[in-house]
């Protein structure tokens, strides 16, 4: 187990290194970074001064090594649009995104997994058919459209809920519904399909032959073996949300990481973009490791010797 963890940690470092390398060279695709930070009427002298301030007069390999060395220390430079350095700016937005992501995933799992289990247990019933229709619609409806419609009805017309911002529990309702509609549909469909595979297994028939109740068969035996796929999807969705639910945060003016990254790209604040990419890469690799380790806890047959 320890050797496996060490190997995965080394892979984490490689992933972050490659992500930073790609982003470093991509900043030059749009032209001179110094010119992009200045107004359109900037003089050549202004551009040259900015190049010197940003260290762009040095050879490209020197710039790259300096960038990687500073990034390894968490130093991505100062933000051009926000006070302070880039990484503290990114980290200050993480709690808002994490709060929204965790609430959204809890609601998604709490609704979707029972629906998927019951739908599989009552295969071809009216409940199963309605569940299929609802989950297909949940994945088909664009998130930005759903968010705008919810805001138009519940906030603008009815005046029941705030249109945006982060505050009390009422501020979570519309953003969480917008997130949950898509992710809950994915969890429900996956839960149903994996449960159908498991319910056809020999050990399930044996458990039923022993006289166990359907609830014990479905939740104690079948669901645990079906949870490997659910756990994999959970890791994928959680790291995506921690990387920033850009659409939801933008629609509801949620002060999270996704909205910050979008604003930084539009404002050409590359220091914040670099810091955000580094954070998302670390989160992605870490979630992959945690999900792989959780496999052994869910399924005793999984070993990392």
Image (cartoon, rainbow, N blue to C red):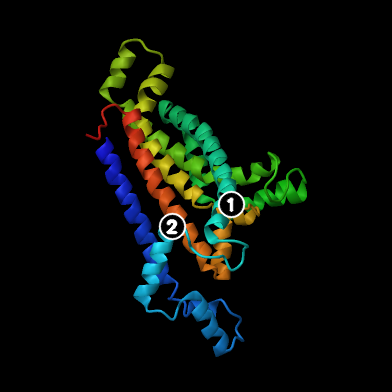
* Residue at 36 percent of width and 22 percent of height: 221
Report the mark closest to the observer, 1 or 2. 2
Which residue is nearer to you in this view: 266 or 28? 28
Vertical placement of residue 124 versus 82, above or below:
above
Location of residue 260 in the rendering, given as x and y in whole percent from the top left corner: 58, 59
Vertical placement of residue 39 versus 86, above or below:
below
C-alpha span from label 1 to label 2:
18 Å
Secondary structure, mark 2, is: loop
**Visible residue check, residue 258:** no
Specify the quadrant that holds the N terminus. top left
Which residue is nearer to you in this view: 99 or 61? 61
Tag shown at residue 92? 1
* Residue at 58 percent of width and 79 percent of height: 38
**Visible residue check, residue 186:** yes
Residue indicated by mark 2 = 73
Disc on the earlier residue, 1 or 2:
2
Secondary structure, mark 1, is: helix
């Amino acid at each position: 187990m320890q050797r496996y963890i060490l190997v995965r940690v080394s892979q984490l470092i490689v992933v972050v290194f490659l992500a930073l390398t790609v982003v470093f060279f991509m900043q030059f695709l749009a032209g001179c970074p110094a010119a992009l930070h200045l107004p359109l009427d900037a003089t050549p002298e202004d551009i040259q001064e900015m190049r010197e301030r940003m260290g762009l007069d040095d050879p490209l390999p020197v710039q790259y090594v300096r960038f990687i060395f500073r990034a390894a220390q968490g130093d991505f430079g100062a933000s051009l649009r926000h006070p302070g350095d880039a990484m503290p700016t990114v980290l200050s937005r993480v709690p808002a995104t994490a709060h929204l992501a965790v609430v959204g995933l809890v609601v998604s799992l709490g609704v979707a997994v029972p629906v998927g289990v019951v739908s599989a247990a009552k295969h071809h019933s009216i409940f199963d058919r309605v569940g299929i229709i609802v989950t297909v619609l949940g994945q088909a409806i664009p998130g930005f459209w759903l968010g705008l419609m919810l805001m138009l009805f519940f906030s603008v017309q009815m005046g029941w809920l705030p249109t945006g911002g982060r505050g009390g529990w009422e501020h979570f309702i519309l953003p969480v519904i917008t997130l949950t509609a898509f992710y809950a549909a994915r969890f429900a469909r996956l839960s149903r399909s994996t449960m159908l595979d498991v319910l056809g297994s020999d050990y399930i028939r044996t458990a039923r032959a022993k006289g166990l109740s359907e609830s014990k068969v479905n939740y104690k035996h079948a669901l645990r073996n079906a949870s490997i796929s659910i756990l994999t999807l959970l890791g994928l969705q959680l790291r995506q949300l921690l990387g920033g639910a850009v659409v939801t945060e933008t629609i509801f003016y949620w002060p999270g990481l996704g909205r910050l990254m979008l604003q930084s790209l539009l404002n050409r604040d590359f220091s914040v973009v670099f810091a955000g990419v580094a954070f998302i890469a670390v989160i992605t690799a870490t979630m992959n490791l945690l999900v792989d380790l959780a496999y052994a806890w869910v399924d005793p047959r999984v070993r990392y010797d």
